[in-house]
Image (cartoon, rainbow, N blue to C red):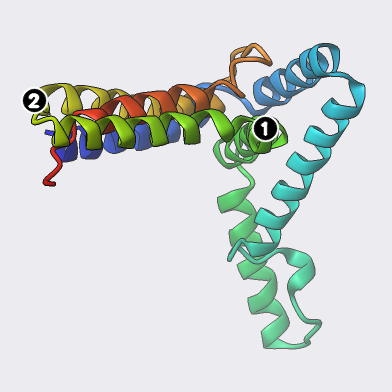
Amino acid sequence: MIRAMAVVSLLVLLVLVLYVPSAHPPERFIEQLRTEYTNAAVFWGKDAGTRMLSRAMSMQQSARQASPVPSSKDAAPVGGVNAAVGQEMASVNQRLFNNPYFRSIDALLLLASFRLAMLLEWLPWLLAFPVAALVDGCLVRVVKAKEFLHHSPEMFALYACLAILTSCATVLAFVLPFTLHPLAVPCVPVVIGTLMGTAIRDFHARI
């Protein structure tokens, strides 16, 4: 059940992520990024908002450098037939990747990078909560096994599926052009860690 839920969730997530850029122009994602930055600067402070934006821009620049798509400035200066072939290939790449859909994907990735930067900004302080939930779940699991208490596979599957759905919903929320509260993103690891810790409590243990 858990494997089927994971496969179905990932497939649906992939379809929705690929559909979002076709439904919204790139200007919509840029406008949403400005709104998110303003909200983060007001809620967390201007310095924190600037750090998030700087990290998002760095991630976007790194992604562009790692992209296998060649740019026109990467072409070596040649003459004759090779120059004509190079110009034609550059023209094909321009027509293929410089259309509204791919520009929307680029703007979508920038918005998602900013939200990921917001999560990374507070992740070192937030990791204590999911780690505590996982440790608590493991200890309760061991105690229940030693006391021969019943482990419920149904509850384990339920909470594991909820954790998977929450993770997929988080990825989808990162790319959708609607306003997220600045406090919503940092709460994601706390919620997922709590669900996983609760699931571990009912995972069968042999002692």
Residue appearing at x 56%, y 22% in the figure: 24
| Residue 130 point in image, percent of width and height | 48, 31
Secondary structure, mark 1, is helix
Given residues 72 and 176, the one toward you in this image is 176
| Residue 87 point in image, percent of width and height | 70, 70
Is residue 107 visible in this depiction of the protein?
Answer: no
Q: What is the three-letter code of the residue carrying label 1?
A: Trp
When the figure is inspected, residue 63 is found, relative to residue 167, above or below; the finding is below
Secondary structure, mark 2, is loop
Q: How many C-alpha atoms fall within 10 Å of the one at disc 1: few (<14), some, or many (≥20)? A: few
Residue appearing at x 20%, y 22% in the figure: 158
The residue wearing badge 1 is: 125
Q: Quadrant of residue 17?
A: top left
Q: Quadrant of residue 182?
A: top right
* Marks 2 and 1, the one that precedes in the sequence: 1
Q: CA distance from mark 2 to mark 1?
A: 35 Å
In the rendered view of the protein, which quadrant contains the N terminus?
top left
Pointer 2 and pointer 1: residues touching (CB < 8 Å)?
Answer: no
Given residues 72 and 35, the one toward you in this image is 35
Residue appearing at x 81%, y 82% in the figure: 77
Given residues 89 and 108, the one toward you in this image is 108
Is residue 181 visible in this depiction of the protein?
Answer: yes
When the figure is inspected, residue 105 is found, relative to residue 98, above or below; the finding is above
The residue wearing badge 2 is: 150
Q: Quadrant of residue 74?
A: bottom right
When the figure is inspected, residue 68 is found, relative to residue 61, above or below; the finding is below
Does residue 121 appear left or right of residue 168 in this picture?
right
| Residue 183 point in image, percent of width and height | 65, 15
Q: How many C-alpha atoms fall within 10 Å of the one at disc 2: few (<14), some, or many (≥20)? A: few
Q: What is the three-letter code of the residue carrying label 2?
A: His
Does residue 193 appear left or right of residue 129 in this picture?
left
- Residue 203 shows which numbered tag? none
